Amino acid sequence: MSASREQFGSRLGFILAAAGSAVGIGNLVGFPVGAAKNGGGAFLLMYAIFVFLICLPVMMAEMSVGRKTHKDPLGAYSTLSSGAGHWKLAGWLSIITPFMIAVFYLVITVWLFGYLFQSATGNLTYLADPNTFGEFVNAPWIFVYMVAVLAVVYLILQGGVKQGIEKAAKLLMPTLFVMLIILVVFVLTQDNAMEGVKFYLVPDISKIDAAVVNGALSQAFFSLSLGMGIMITYGSYISDQDDVPGSAKLVALTDTAVAFIAGLMILPAIFSFNPATNPDELSESSVGMIFTFLPKIFLALQATIGYVGASFVASFFFLLVFFAAITSLVSIFEVPVAAYMDERKVSRKKALVVLGIMLVVMASLAALSFGISPMLTEFVSYAGQSKSLFDVIYDVFYDTVLPLNGLLICIFVIYRWKKANFNAELDKGSPKYRGSWFEKYVDFSVGTFIPLILLVIFVNTVALKYFGTALIG
């Protein structure tokens, strides 16, 4: 290991940073609504099972590869495969994917910052207008908000691993959790809130089918930031004495807990602030929920706590989601930054500037694809639908490539790096893991049914997204 390689200063810092990458917009909004629309408690149970039986072993595979090599994903694949060309392609895919995900995630984070600003300045009526979101995403000041968001990301990443990412995680993650608990307590004390809790937690077995099972697995895989190269990169920043299996369990547990608790905020809030809500009208889209549905719910709250109170609650919510988005965006963008530093032997400052310019250009093009630029708005067509540049980036790099990257890491650690080396790396710093039933399970699952499941998800996603035919569901 290079003596100059950055490292996290503590195990807590690593866990909070990794959890920060996992806890994002989908956890706070998409997961609760997806659970409510797809079987409630049954969905929650399937999600938890998938997190710990399928996603946790994949996370451990990524962390172990990073820790063994102390390199970025490209360097890690290259080192452990002795420079095999086809595995370097897998490494490149693990670098390009997070960069492109950072593009659309930056756009959404900019929207969040704009809505936070508008709600904090008392413009809740404006945000609740059905026409606002369409106007907002095409307004010129969206690029002013982008500058502000980029400044926050730059300030965190320029501090490096210990003074930037770890310090921000230790501040933002506990703050996010406290804010979430405060909002949950507030919501659960409102009239009719228990109806939302019932809708969220009581299983509706009749809704369980193959599509719901696939949805729960996909949500679990995506919510833990797997397939993005984040866990490989963060794994490269921990020492050989750290307990990888134990840390991975805590990250998975934290992510699941936040998603679950968020459900105790979103659904009861909807049922309490607007008792006439039809559950079938809830959008499974996080974007639709945050920017079009929830502002109307917050505005309805003024009948009980006044306009100022409703604006405060809305601002508090948007600040919560903004914090979650920032922690994820920082983690996502750190992957290409670390790779550029490692492969080109440049300073962090230069890597941030070069990749930052590329990110701004791509994110600006994506932001223009909501109507401002007809060419970017109707960028391409597939599966009988016109797709914008933003849609294409999301469909390709988030929905499609992530399970493919997960499939590749499983095949790599078992059949290229070999089981013995994989297990030996996980045994370091974790004496209780050696010879345990969990070690046997991880060893078996990563080499057998987990790759098969990820392959099915990948093939089904390709068939559905690009050809309009679902193989499952």
Image (spheres, grey):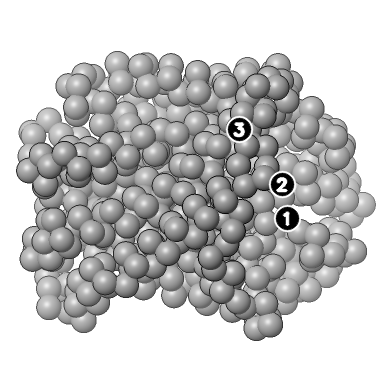
Work out whether residue 275 or residue 42 is closer to the camera in this orientation and state it.
Answer: 42
Which residue is identified by label 2? 288
Q: Nearer the viewer, mark 3 or mark 2?
A: 3
Q: Quadrant of the C terminus?
A: bottom right
Residue at screen point 67% across, 29% down: 378
Going by the numbered disc 1, the residue's amino acid type is Ser
CA neighbours of label 3 inside 10 A, class few (<14), some (14 to 19), many (20+)? some
Calculate the distance from the C-alpha at mark 3 to the C-alpha at mark 2.
22 Å
Residue at screen point 53% across, 65% down: 471
Calculate the distance from the C-alpha at mark 3 to the C-alpha at mark 1.
25 Å
Asked whether disc 2 touches disc 1, contact meaning CB atoms under 8 Å apart, the reply is yes
The tag earlier along the polypeptide, 3 or 1, is 1
Going by the numbered disc 2, the residue's amino acid type is Gly
Q: Secondary structure at mark 3?
A: strand
Work out whether residue 70 or residue 319 is closer to the camera in this orientation and state it.
Answer: 70
Tell me: residue 186, above or below residue 443.
above
Q: Secondary structure at mark 1?
A: loop
Q: Is residue 405 left or right of residue 319?
A: left
Q: Is residue 125 left or right of residue 415?
A: right
Tell me: residue 10, above or below residue 345.
below
Asked whether residue 254 is in view, the answer is no
Q: Quadrant of the N terminus?
A: top left
Which residue is identified by label 1? 283
Calculate the distance from the C-alpha at mark 2 to the C-alpha at mark 1.
6 Å
Going by the numbered disc 3, the residue's amino acid type is Val
The tag earlier along the polypeptide, 2 or 1, is 1
Tell me: residue 89, above or below residue 303.
above
Q: Quadrant of residue 31?
A: bottom right
Which residue is identified by label 3? 380
Picture coordinates of residue 335 (x, y %)? 32, 36
Q: Quadrant of residue 44?
A: bottom right
